[in-house]
Structure formats: structure tokens, C-alpha cells
Image (tube, rainbow, N blue to C red):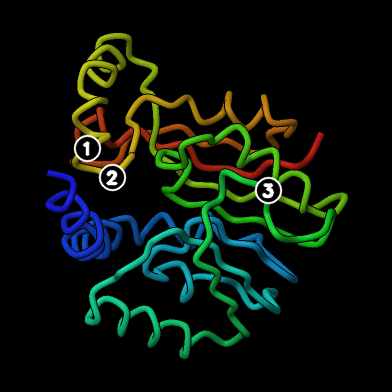
Amino acid sequence: MSRLYDFYEQRVFPRFLDVAMQQMEKLRPRALAGARGEVLEIGFGTGLNLEHYPKGVERLCALDPMAGIPESVQARIDARIQAAPFPVEHFPLRADGRLPFEDARFDSVTVTFTLCTIPDASLALAEMRRVLKPGGQLHFAEHGRSDVPGVARWQDRLNPIQNVIGCGCNLNRKIDALIQQAGFDLEELDFFCLEKAPRVVGTIYQGIARPA
């Protein structure tokens, strides 16, 4: 079972992820619009954010834990990195440990559709806060817990299944609360449901936060 799941996680899921995340394309430009200077991206995935970064970005450091990616998917990632108008450093590292960067290094941190999957999201957010410069911004777009009680109950019921098929993805995290508890102030927050998407997976938190 373990070998079968490893095969799914490393060979099947990355292909599915690349296709599924392309459905979120319309959210990316607004989520990344204010990023500038030296940027840290948590959860680089297959590099779909790259074409949506604004002109103010000078350099990108990207973290992602995915390993053993199929060659066809890796080729798409490499092509997206090569096409970026700024240097990209790609680190295959988890985000829920201490980040390998000094305090107050980055002008912006971006995280899109990733906080749902990080095992210790609170620790990861605390580290994002640590590496942001004073006045720096966290830009985020995430799916999470619905504010409709009946939908939230279904999210709780389905979450163990989603954890398996989504390789650690959680349906029921309250993203705004996690960000605030990590020491951020929310400057902007849009809370909505994606059109034509079930509320259990389509409830979106999108906004900007600064270290408190």
C-alpha cells in the first residue's frame, strides 16, 4: 500500500495538480499584483504563478517539497522558469520547518493554494513573518473553511478522505484566523466561493497581510 501511494503521490498527483491548478488561473493575477522586490514563494508547485508576477518583482526564491516529479511535468516547470523575466531559485524544501533565510530578507512572500497542505501551517506562517522585511507583505489565495455551518460540517466529514487523495490537503482550515494567529494584520481580505465549484472545495480566502 505504501509503495502504491508513493507512486500516486510522486507520479500521478503532480500531473493532476498541474491540470487542477490551472483552473485557478483567473485568481492569480490579483493575488500576486502587489508583490515586489525580492519575493519568497511558498508552494511553487508546477510554476503556474510565474507568468502572473508584476514588473516590480526582481528575484524569486521558490520553495516546494515535491520530489520524483514525472519528466513531462518537470519539463513544463523548467520551461516556465526559463521564460520568467527575473531570476528564479527553486528549493525542494518543506515550509513547515525553519526557513533557510535570514530575518527580514524578503520584500514580499506569496502563498497560493498551499496552506491547506502544509502539515504545520502555523509554524510555516510564523517563519514567513520572520523572513519578511518591516513593511513587507504576505500575498495569499487559499481555499478553506466555509462560513456556512452545513458546508463546514461536510468539510469536516470529508477531510480525512481529502487528506489521502489530495496528498495532505485539508478542506476545513480557517485561513484568515491562521494568518492572524501567526502575528499578521490583515490589510485586505476577499472571502467568496468560486463559480461552478462545490462550496466544500471552492471557498476562497484571498488578500494581503503585514507583520503586526
| Secondary structure state at the residue bearing disc 3 | loop
* Pointer 3 residue: 98
Q: Is residue 60 above or below residue 114?
A: below
Residue pictured at 25% horizontal, 61% vertical? 10
Q: Residues within 10 Å of mark 2 (few under 14, many from 20)?
A: some
* Pointer 2 residue: 167
Q: Residues within 10 Å of mark 3 (few under 14, many from 20)?
A: few
Q: Are marks 3 and 2 in contact (CB under 8 Å)?
A: no
> CA gap, disc 3 to disc 1?
26 Å
Looking at numbered disc 2 in the image, what kind of residue is underneath it? Answer: Cys
> CA gap, disc 2 to disc 1?
5 Å
Residue pictured at 68% horizontal, 54% vertical? 99
Q: Is residue 1 above or below residue 54?
A: above
Report the quarter where the N terminus lies.
top left
Q: Are marks 2 and 1 in contact (CB under 8 Å)?
A: yes
Q: Is residue 200 left or right of residue 28?
A: left
- Residue nearest the viewer, comparing 29 with 181: 181
The picture quadrant where one finds residue 164 is top left
